[in-house]
Image: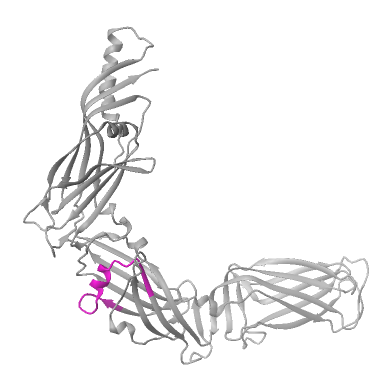
Amino acid sequence: MKRISILHNAIGLAFAILCAMTFTRCSRNEPTVWDADVLVPLATGRLTLSNVVDDSILYADASGLWHVKFERELADFNLDTIVAIDDTTIAVGFELPISGSFNPGQFAPDIVEEIRLNLPSTQLRHVRFSRGTLEYRLISAIQGDLICNFALPGLSRNGAAELIRIETNPGTAASPFSQSGSIDLTGYELALTGPMNNDYNVVETILGIQVDPAASGPATVLLNDVVQMELKFVEPGVEYADGYFGQHNYTLNESVELDASVNLPQGTLDLNGAVMNVNIRNAVGMDAQLHFTGLRGFDSATGNAIELDHAPLFAPLNIARAARNGSTVTAEEHQYTLNSDNSNLDAFMEFLPSDLTMTADVVLNPLGDVSAGNDFIFLDDALSARVALDIPLRIGMQNLTFRDTLELTNDAVEALFNGDLSLWLKNEFPIGARCTLRLLQGGDLTTVVEGAQIDAASPTTSVGVTQAAESWIKIALTPEIIGQVNDTHQLVIDVALDTPGAGSVVGIYEHYGIDFKLVADGTYTFELGQ
């Protein structure tokens, strides 16, 4: 769309006159006024398929025929829940096996404790975090200055195990020493196999205690003194996990908005040649069984629905687990291809559904732990069901409408128009059309042309090539409309295409469009200076 001021083409003429006046007489401060009979283009533009369909989903094939192609996630299987570590607080007490008085620099034996996470349906061996925080708090009632080294051998980032060093002050049972901190878990890995590397859901911890070498005196340790460490996982997100994830059953009811994504032309569509691919991709190290129970299109405006009919899609599907070689994952995929020969896809898409709804039953690990605890998952690429539509735009058009909004700007120069308006159109579609033009002012539309006929382009012997047809539409003006032309900033043009007869189908090619120009033939009054 071109935005052209009402004044732009006339200003050149006004400027020439002004220059002439400047050289023929002295400058004056009084307003200068003149009339100019001119043919002025008020607005120009070109209407194409991109006025109806988002460019991002359009492509032209080798013949130049437009296709609408889009792909969307059909189902969210929410597999992050099966390997989730919930927000939880764990308190582990390290009971010292010694008592007595210990001089600065002396060590106590390391104390090893295991923390078993409460994951009833999942046996995790390793996870890698995408987000979250590990908060900790050390509490000590030991009467002395200590250096406590709290190690988490299984928690590491870039191969370095996490070690928390805390220097304590003397504490008592009534008034223990306490210190808190936190670790950003992003990018950390956590081994949950325990000290012997043969377990699951187990976090190994080691506490080493030394009397601070810089302490002013010995530390007193009473029998059964305990140093306590509290750990709290806060909103941990997992991006990778392995182990055995259990058997899970899901009932899915997922919806995808089509009208916002596809924005298919309104009207009667002949979509012969449309193809829908439903792709199931399993990039998880788990077997899966899927049973689609419905795929429906809904019209949100009317509440009507249509069921997609393709028998193979609704048969139970067993899809094997993905394979992994190091960091390389080879997914298992299965694709259903629907067209007019094996389904009711034409009728389904001609229904113009605004929403696509899928229902399905899903079982993960239907045979149990067949991998001996070697399931794996990368959450950014897991189990997916995607739908892809490819629609060649051969359309039987009834009221297929192109729309454009034209901006008319004001300049510092004031101008008033009085005369005739005409709309010139050049149509490259081999289809007749009707044009409606409205003035937009303050949210209100005033119709100045309604349903004016536009001639069809003439076909040629070359596929997709036409001889454009030109049409002129005279606009009858009233004083009210002239006033609005002078005041308004926006014009709205609608062009509705129609096939010449029932059942006619026309291909839409990338080079088709309708050029238009709104022109004024009359008097402009210009006034410069105040």
Q: Measured from the top left, where is residue 281 in percent x and y?
A: 39, 77
Residue 32 lies in quadrant: top left
Q: Residue at x 18, y 43 (%)?
A: 425
Q: Is residue 438 magenta?
A: no
| Residues rendered magenta in the picture | 336-357
Q: Is residue 214 above or below residue 405?
A: below
198 vs 215, nearest the viewer: 198
Q: Residue furthest left?
A: 461
Q: Is residue 449 left or right of residue 202?
A: left
Q: Is residue 118 left or right of residue 337?
A: right
Q: Residue at x 67, y 77 (%)?
A: 153
Q: Is residue 488 left or right of residue 158?
A: left
Q: Is residue 524 above or below residue 518?
A: above
Q: Is residue 1 above or below residue 328?
A: above
**Quadrant of the rendering where the C terminus is positioned:** top left
Residue 131 lies in quadrant: bottom right
393 vs 156, nearest the viewer: 393
Q: Residue at x 25, y 33 (%)?
A: 478
Q: Measured from the top left, where is residue 331 in percent x and y?
A: 40, 79
Q: Measured from the top left, where is residue 347 in percent x and y?
A: 24, 72
Q: What scheme was used to colour the molecule?
A: one colour
**Quadrant of the rendering where the N terminus is positioned:** top left
Q: Is residue 425 left or right of residue 233?
A: left
Residue 116 lies in quadrant: bottom right
Q: Is residue 341 magenta?
A: yes
189 vs 353, nearest the viewer: 353
Q: How many marks?
A: 0
Q: Measured from the top left, where is residue 41 in percent x and y?
A: 23, 33
